[in-house]
Image (spheres, rainbow, N blue to C red):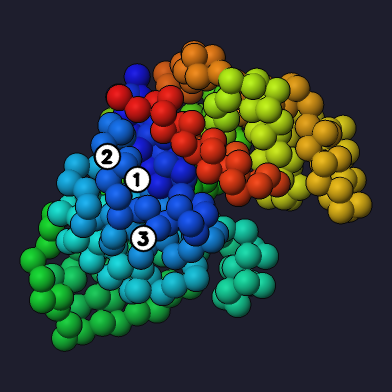
Amino acid sequence: MFGHITACFSVTPTGKRNKLDESRIHYLRRLNEPRAEDAGFDALWTSEMFHDPFLPLAAAASSTSRISLGTSIALAFVRSPWVTALSALDLDVLSGGRFILGLGTGLKRLNERWHGVAYGKPTPHIRECVKLIRLITERAHGGEPIRFSGQYYDVDIQGWQRPLAPTREKLPIYLAGVREGMIRTAAEVADGLLGHPIYSLRWINEVVLPSLARGLRETGRRREDFELCLAVCCAVDRDVAAARRAAAATIAFYATVNTYEPLFARFPHDVARIREGLMNGDQACMVDAVSEEMVDAFAVAGRPEEVKRQMAGYSQLSDSICLSPPDQLIDPGETERYREALLATFSD
């Protein structure tokens, strides 16, 4: 059923990838422990909101031997493609060919106000970024010139060769995407799509799968050569009401972000109340405004046996699943508790 692990603490069902979502600094101290691998998961992923996405995986590489190690996600525009490519190649060497480079655009405000970098038009920007990273990783060991000229990047690298043997011919690159354009771009230039934790089953069926199929068809690619990794906000607790409220907190947070408005189009009145709570600085009101229908649509929450049963709807639509604990508008200790519950529930 489930099987892929990750490190943003998420978990993936057996036979599928489990994603551990390491989102808190104190949890990073345990990244060099092989807990995810010992629990039977298949992949470990790191995120970037609270820490560097690459550095923790270097520690994990030294204490694991089987699981894949990936970024979910590293922000694509805040580093040069050259820096990103070298970090990816180094991690692939350290892990013995187990690294997956997961990239995403992030929000415009995050790029421009936090990092001071140009955002531009995200779809063509990340298309160029991935193509250039791919070019660098593929030519790094042969000494060939690396030339690229586009709207966002203009690179001319000559007389350089990486003094290490490549771990494998092609390093996998996955893209995060929510809307049709980015999903189609992932199908065009990447090896996989990293889903968002608040994808609903309806969004997956009506937007994600058709967009992915169209993108693959337009580029002449086969579905079996592309991985769809769905992320799911998952709260496991014997106290069902507590689990659902924790999930509601994460849903409330994302409902305030303009970029995600299309996902919440069926819940305009709930979203209006959530945003009213935000404007008033009342987080409890924000969470209270999340309806039971919203929790059912955007999360899986409840007792262990119930959660496993609810996961069937996602499992049949994906190649791998990333189960992410509630991590917004709740105490970090609660996130840690839900993370441990996911490990216990989905361990072999």
Q: Residue 173 location, x and y as percent?
A: 33, 52
Q: Are marks 2 and 1 in contact (CB under 8 Å)?
A: yes
Mark positioned earlier in the residue sequence (2 or 1): 2
Task: Kindly identify which residue carries mark 1.
Answer: 44
Q: Residue 226 location, x and y as percent?
A: 32, 37
Circle 2: element type: helix
Q: Nearest the camera: 306 or 295?
A: 306
Q: Say whether residue 338 is left or right of residue 110.
A: left
Circle 3: element type: helix
What number is the disc on residue 37? Answer: 2
Task: Kindly identify which residue carries mark 3.
Answer: 56
Q: Residue 345 location, x and y as percent?
A: 43, 25
Q: In which quarter of the image is residue 251?
A: top right
> Would residue 206 be seen by someone viewing this image from the given angle?
no
Q: Nearest the camera: 216 or 142?
A: 142
Circle 1: element type: strand
Crowdedness of circle 2 by 10 Å Cα count: few (<14), some, many (20+)? many
Instruction: Determine the residue positioned at 42% across, 18% down.
Output: 316
Q: Residue 271 location, x and y as percent?
A: 81, 38
Instruction: Determine the residue positioned at 73% across, 50% down.
Output: 258
Q: Say whether residue 233 is left or right of residue 265.
A: left
Looking at the rendered structure, the kind of residue marked 2 is Glu
Crowdedness of circle 3 by 10 Å Cα count: few (<14), some, many (20+)? many
Q: Are marks 3 and 2 in contact (CB under 8 Å)?
A: no
